[in-house]
Image (cartoon, grey):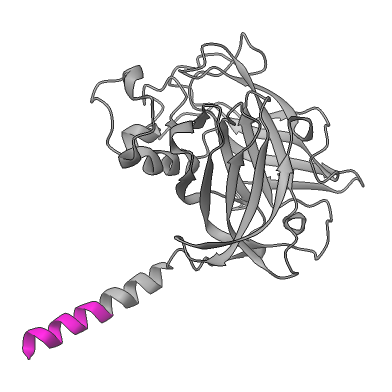
């Protein structure tokens, strides 16, 4: 069992998000007592985290004073099931980011998809990759983790990837209510990006919502700093929270994933994106068969095979 330091709740500055309604005011996290972070606090450039630290909670507040809290322990924060690069693959590196020795019990995304060497640390030559054979798998592994020091490294020109979540989410209100359904973290606090909700279709041809444009001024400085393998110096994480209705979708429409496009030429370095919602607003995703569905499919396939063998 991993040994973790006590929960730390970091209060953030109060910049508004692009909707003009929501700010991220706190991020709770745990830091493994093993690994490379030592006694670092993450609260300044000199104290930047260099290894995994894990999200535990998110607090937000709207301009109207509506406060909301989300907890990993309560199932309120839903991670990715699959990530697919759609365009600009050479401009977005799959990257594990942190200086990970795996001693904290959390393998980096490259190790999880079988890339690297058996003895840590993994050489810098495989800490990021645009190789299509591993790119989507490594990005998926990064975004399937609560680690806030893993993600993608943008290289300048525009790129787009889609993220499908383990569950879908339905907005709790038909209008912008100051209660967000999504949060994003971007490393560097210097990049803009566009968001589109995935509301149907197939993985090969999703149906997208209208676009939300997120500029650097729309994001919230978290006061959390990381120093990843390839950046050479500490960078701050910037947060952005959005209400589902801001995508222009109909009331009651579920969102099953998001499309992210880096737009301002700096190459957004995304380290986290996830659904924020209590379980009573989470729904099954048509992109991800439920375990029971898998069981039914296997049973049907087995029965069909048995019939063929008997005939």
Front residue of 252 and 11: 252
Which residues, given as a range, are shown in magenta? 300-311
Q: Residue at x 7, y 89 (%)?
A: 310
Give the farthest residue toward the top. 46
In which quadrant of the rendered view does residue 262 lie?
A: top right
Compare residues 156 and 82 and report the one nearer the observer: 156
**Residue 305 magenta-highlighted:** yes
Which of the two residues, 87 or 17, is positioned nearer the viewer here?
87
Single out the residue that lies furthest toward the bottom.
311
The residue that appears at 20% across and 83% down in the rendered structure is 303
Residue that sits furthest to the left in the current view: 310
When the figure is inspected, residue 275 is found, relative to residue 50, above or below; the finding is: below
Q: Is residue 233 above or below residue 249?
A: above
Which image quarter holds the C terminus? bottom left
Q: Is residue 50 magenta?
A: no
In the image, taking residue 176 as reference, residue 102 lies left or right, namely left
In the picture, measured across the screen, residue 248 lies left or right of residue 74, that is right
Q: Residue 177's x, y, as percent?
A: 84, 56
Estimate the x, y position of residue 62 in percent, counting from the top left. 85, 45
**Residue nearest the observer in this picture, 248 or 12:** 248
Q: In this rendering, does residue 297 appear at all?
A: yes
Q: Is residue 24 above or below residue 275?
A: above
Q: Where in the figure is residue 166, as x and y percent of width and height?
A: 50, 57
């Amino acid at each position: 069992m991993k040994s973790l330091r006590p929960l730390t709740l970091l209060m953030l500055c109060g910049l508004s998000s692009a909707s003009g309604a929501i700010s991220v005011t706190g991020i709770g996290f745990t830091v493994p007592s093993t690994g490379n972070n030592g006694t670092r606090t993450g609260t300044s450039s000199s104290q930047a985290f260099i290894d995994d630290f894990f999200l535990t909670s998110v607090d937000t507040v709207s301009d109207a004073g509506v406060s909301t809290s989300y907890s990993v322990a309560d199932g309120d924060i839903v991670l990715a099931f699959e990530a697919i690069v759609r365009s600009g693959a050479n401009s977005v590196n799959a990257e594990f980011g942190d200086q990970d020795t795996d001693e904290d019990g959390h393998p980096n995304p490259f190790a999880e998809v079988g890339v690297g060497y058996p003895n840590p640390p993994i050489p810098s030559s495989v800490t990021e990759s645009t190789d299509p054979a591993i790119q989507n798998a490594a990005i998926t592994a990064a975004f399937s983790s609560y680690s806030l020091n893993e993600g993608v490294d943008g290289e300048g020109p525009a790129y787009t990837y889609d993220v499908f979540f383990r569950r879908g989410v339905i907005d709790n209100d038909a209008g912008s209510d100051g209660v967000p359904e999504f949060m994003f973290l971007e490393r560097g606090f210097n990049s803009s990006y566009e968001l589109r909700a995935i509301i149907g279709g197939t993985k090969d041809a999703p149906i997208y919502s209208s676009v939300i444009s997120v500029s650097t001024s729309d994001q919230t400085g978290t006061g959390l700093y990381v120093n990843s393998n390839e950046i050479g110096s500490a960078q701050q994480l910037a947060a952005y929270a959005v209400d589902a209705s801001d995508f222009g979708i109909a009331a009651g429409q579920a969102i099953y994933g998001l499309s992210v496009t880096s737009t301002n030429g700096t190459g957004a370095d995304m380290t986290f994106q996830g659904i924020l919602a209590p379980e009573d607003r989470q729904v099954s995703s048509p992109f991800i068969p439920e375990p029971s569905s898998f069981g039914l499919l296997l049973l049907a396939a087995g029965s069909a095979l048995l019939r063929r063998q008997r005939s």
